[in-house]
Image (tube, coloured by chain):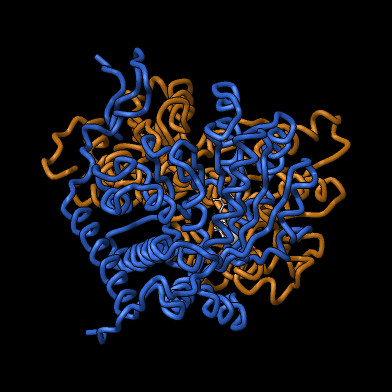
């Protein structure tokens, strides 16, 4: 990371993304944006506000509803050296483009013996909890994190949104850039000037000695909230923000658990075969002798997410669920008002 | 409050399209119900009784009524997420539709689907679907099943598959129409062309903006009809369904209408030109059909007002029902995941241990 930080500003995650896209469009004429409703409509979540006006329709390309087509077309442009940044309205709709992402973008460099590289970024938000029902509330990041050839990053703060998006756009490989519906309006301090994160590195975003919570994206914000709340009860919680789901920074995870002896993974996806499964296996392999309790996962109930608020709330992992499990792991009695 | 105007004797009346006055009155009642239901949905959304995404049929009422007048009870209906009006006119009670929007257990989909996912097996409303184009391949498959299950003829069932103009650009549309053309399936694909897919006009989204012409690629008839003309819509849809059920000839029907408001209730539609908004308002089928029926004497002003009041009252009952209905029970969270029982089916709530460590 660039260290000559002079000043910072408090801005939203949305604004950090918008400013970064603008800066990269200005810096490199090979960068262009493509996606549904990103121009005239300024993006479903207004991430691309003002960009069509300033950069014109060749750089900010409105696409029809044809995810497979325009993701594949962006990939093709990347093969010829362009640096497309695709917006897919939500991760749910990426399933229509998954063949181009998994069978093509991820494979080309290896399959063609390094003759071509794919500097493609696919930005898309995941997330549930807004009563968007089963098809519009999914956290499918693990599908992409599973695929060799892809890089998958998941910033949890506005500062990381900026630094990881800059890194993703300048990266020569296909990068899945995971955003989250509930983070867009979150505010945080963002350093001015060029910031480039190193993809593949996790961060300890809060230090502690009793237990490690591992999370990513919006989960990290909940983890921090719970850690602070438990701090008031005298527990010292460390929070590891994965930032990169592929590659995975196993060293940072295990180093933390070696120190604390306890780990809980907080994830928004479904439990079986999820992000937490990989983290738990990593800790089992890399920090087994240091563990004082089994690693636990707090994940979504394994059900297509219902629309009704009561059911949705029950199915999604909450701060209260996380606090309860942290106490269980630390073998403390849980207070009755948790759930 | 409206002054009592006398209805002219029906026999003297020049009736639009030579239709029986009762039919026209009935259509206006339906249009008025859809209008009242949608306006109230918007209001209930603002009051946070409805959550998630909520897309309305405002401005599309003549299309909704015309299509639903053409489809028979035995036919199957698949639609996108802009589905409230179709559900109501398919015969579902406003109570059960509103309850679904409220996320209540008494809703048509048990509160699990919400506005975008209305489903009722009994009336053969085979779903609203939230993924653009998601309904098109299954609708095509339903037609395949009908082809296998029934012989073609005037009493055979057919499938009506509704989709938006923007939806014609997704691969599933083209793949499905090709299958239907190739396999000769009893299906009518209806493009409800309201001119916009979110903020994108048809001209900006489709290289061939005369969408009905896309039928030519699949050797099926492509027909365009004025969606503000309820009778024209009904007749075109009836004829298309006839071809589907009697000749196993799939048809692409494009219905031209306007979306009166934003894409969903939360969209202020600032991207829309003043002209476009004006045209949409001027061609609003509800007041114009109302005025037409009054001018031709089918309804008096008082009749029309009474119909509107009745629709409003009907929707009030639906809201009251939805309000009083219980939310789904959390104990039933996993109830519908699988049809057959299976060993080790997941049932953990978030944070519950999946193994006993001791
Ligand atoms: C595969 C997919 N991509 C994108 C979306 C987001 N989206 C929802 S509705 C819509 C516009 C559809 O427009 P149109 O087909 O004209 O239907 P209308 O809303 O006008 O009824 C879009 C892009 C989606 N739901 N599914
Ligand atoms: Mg449309």
Q: Quadrant of the N terminus of chain A?
A: bottom right
Q: Horizontally, is A250 left or right of A260 in the view?
A: right
Chain coloured blue: B
**Residue B217 is drawn in which quadrant?**
top right
Q: Is residue B56 visible?
A: yes
**Residue B21 is drawn in which quadrant?**
bottom left
Pick the front one: B145 or A265 = B145
Q: What residue is drawn where x is 19% and y is 42%?
A: A339
Q: Horizontally, is A143 left or right of A182 in the view?
A: right
Q: Is residue A186 visible?
A: no
**Residue B279 is drawn in which quadrant?**
bottom right
Q: Residue furthest front?
A: B11
Find residue B323 and report its horizontal and vertical position in percent: 19, 56
Q: What colour is chain A?
A: orange
Q: Is residue A64 above or below residue B104?
A: below
Pick the front one: B109 or B225 = B225
Ligand 2 located in image quadrant: bottom right
Find residue A50 and report its horizontal and vertical position in percent: 63, 74
């Amino acid at each position: 990371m660039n260290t000559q930080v002079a000043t910072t500003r408090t801005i939203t995650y949305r604004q950090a993304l918008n400013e970064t896209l603008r800066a990269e469009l200005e810096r490199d004429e090979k960068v262009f944006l493509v996606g549904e409703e990103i121009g005239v409509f300024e993006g479903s979540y207004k991430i691309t506000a003002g960009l069509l006006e300033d950069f014109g329709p060749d750089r900010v390309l409105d696409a029809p509803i044809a995810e497979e087509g325009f993701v594949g077309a962006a990939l093709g442009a990347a093969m010829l050296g362009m640096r497309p940044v695709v917006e897919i309205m939500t991760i749910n709709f990426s399933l229509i483009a998954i063949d181009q992402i998994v069978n093509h973008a991820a494979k080309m460099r290896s399959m063609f013996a390094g003759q071509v590289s794919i500097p493609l970024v696919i930005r898309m938000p995941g997330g549930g909890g807004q009563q968007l029902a089963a098809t519009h509330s999914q956290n499918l990041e693990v599908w992409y994190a599973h695929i060799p050839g892809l890089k998958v990053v998941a910033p949890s703060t506005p500062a990381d949104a900026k630094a990881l998006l800059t890194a993703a756009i300048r990266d020569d490989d296909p990068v899945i850039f995971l955003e989250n519906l509930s983070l867009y309006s979150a505010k945080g301090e963002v350093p001015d000037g060029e910031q480039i994160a190193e993809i593949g590195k996790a961060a300890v975003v809060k230090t502690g000695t009793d237990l490690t919570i591992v999370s990513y994206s919006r989960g990290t914000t909940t983890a921090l909230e719970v850690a602070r709340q438990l701090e008031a009860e005298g527990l010292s919680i460390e929070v590891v923000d994965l930032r990169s789901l592929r590659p995975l920074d196993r060293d940072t995870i295990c180093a933390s658990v070696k120190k604390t002896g306890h780990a809980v993974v907080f994830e928004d996806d479904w439990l079986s075969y999820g992000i937490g499964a990989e983290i738990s296996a990593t800790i089992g392999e890399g920090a087994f002798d240091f563990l004082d309790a089994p690693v636990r996962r707090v994940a979504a109930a394994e059900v297509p997410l219902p629309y009704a608020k009561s059911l949705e709330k029950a199915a999604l992992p909450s701060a209260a669920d996380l606090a309860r499990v942290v106490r269980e792991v630390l073998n403390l009695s849980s207070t009755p008002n948790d759930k | 409050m409206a002054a009592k105007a006398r209805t002219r004797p029906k026999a003297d009346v020049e009736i639009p399209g030579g239709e029986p006055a009762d039919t026209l009155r009935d259509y206006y009642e339906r249009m008025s119900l859809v209008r009242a239901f949608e306006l109230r949905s918007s209001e209930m959304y603002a009051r946070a009784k409805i959550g998630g995404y909520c897309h309305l049929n405002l401005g599309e009422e003549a299309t909704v009524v015309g299509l639903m007048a053409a489809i028979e009870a035995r036919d199957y209906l698949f639609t996108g997420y802009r589905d409230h009006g179709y559900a109501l006119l398919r015969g579902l009670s406003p109570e059960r539709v509103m309850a679904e929007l409220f996320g209540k257990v008494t809703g048509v989909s048990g509160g699990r689907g919400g506005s975008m996912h209305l489903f009722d097996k009994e009336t053969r409303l085979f779903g609203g679907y939230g993924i653009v184009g998601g309904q098109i391949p299954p609708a095509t498959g339903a037609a395949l099943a009908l082809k296998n299950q029934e012989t073609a003829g005037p009493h055979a069932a057919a499938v009506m598959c509704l989709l938006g103009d923007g939806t014609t650009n997704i691969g599933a549309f083209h793949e499905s129409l090709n299958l239907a053309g190739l396999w000769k399936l009893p299906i009518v694909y209806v493009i409800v062309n309201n001119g916009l897919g979110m903020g994108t006009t048809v001209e900006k989204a489709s290289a061939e903006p005369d969408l009905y012409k896309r039928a030519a690629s699949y050797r099926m008839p492509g027909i365009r009809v004025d969606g503000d003309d309820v009778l024209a819509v009904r007749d075109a849809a009836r004829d298309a369904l006839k071809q589907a059920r009697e000749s196993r000839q799939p048809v692409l029907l494009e219905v031209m209408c306007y979306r009166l408001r934003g894409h969903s209730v939360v969209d202020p539609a600032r991207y829309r030109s003043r002209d476009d908004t004006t045209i949409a308002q001027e061609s609003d089928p509800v007041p114009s059909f109302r005025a037409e029926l009054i001018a031709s004497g089918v309804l008096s002003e008082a009749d029309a007002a009474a119909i509107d009041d009745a629709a409003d009252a009907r929707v009030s009952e639906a809201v009251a029902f939805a309000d009083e209905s219980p939310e789904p029970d959390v104990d039933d969270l996993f109830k519908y995941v699988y049809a057959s029982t299976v060993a080790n089916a997941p049932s953990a709530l978030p944070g519950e241990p999946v193994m006993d460590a001791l």
